[in-house]
Amino acid sequence: MSTVATISEKGQLAIPRPIRKALHLEPGDRVSLELEGQRLVLRKKRVGKARLVSGRFGRKVLVAPPGSLPMTTDTVNAILAGPDTLQESMGQGHCRKPKLIS
């Protein structure tokens, strides 16, 4: 896929919609930029996935990836209750928006 974009006076570059869609980029997503010779390579940063490990006393513990928001009891309960409850509890300041992994 090839497309043309223009760099603004501030040095900003808007990523064209077809490329955003192909990479599944959404506002707030992180990307890495690498210079390979005269080529600029843009890659979507992969979000680490949570993993299940054995904790103390042999219990299973869910460990969040580095850099993710802390999973509080309120956050987990809101996620389990569904998106409407998550939005409500975020609006009341009880929990911060978790990084959901699809």
Image: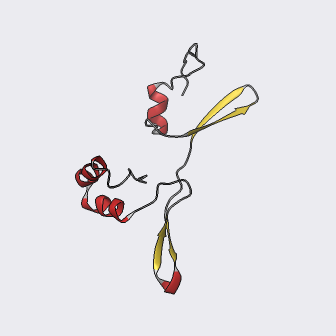
Going by the picture, which residue comes out furthest to the top? Answer: 9
Q: Is residue 27 above or below residue 93?
A: above
- Say which of 82 and 87 sits in front: 87
Q: Quadrant of the N terminus?
A: top right
- Left or right, 27 with respect to 34, comes to left
Give x and y (percent) for residue 92. Answer: 27, 50
- Say which of 71 and 44 sits in front: 71
Give the residue drawn at x 51%, y 23%: 14
Give x and y (percent) for residue 35. Answer: 71, 32
Going by the picture, which residue comes out furthest to the front? Answer: 93
Give the residue drawn at x 55%, y 53%: 67
Give the residue drawn at x 44%, y 27%: 17
- Say which of 74 and 19 sits in front: 74
- Left or right, 35 with respect to 94, comes to right
Q: Is residue 48 above or below residue 36?
A: below
Q: Is residue 29 above or below residue 13?
A: below
Give x and y (percent) for residue 30. Answer: 53, 40
Task: Report which quarter residue 8 is drawn in.
Answer: top right
Going by the picture, which residue comes out furthest to the right? Answer: 37
- Left or right, 33 with respect to 102, comes to right
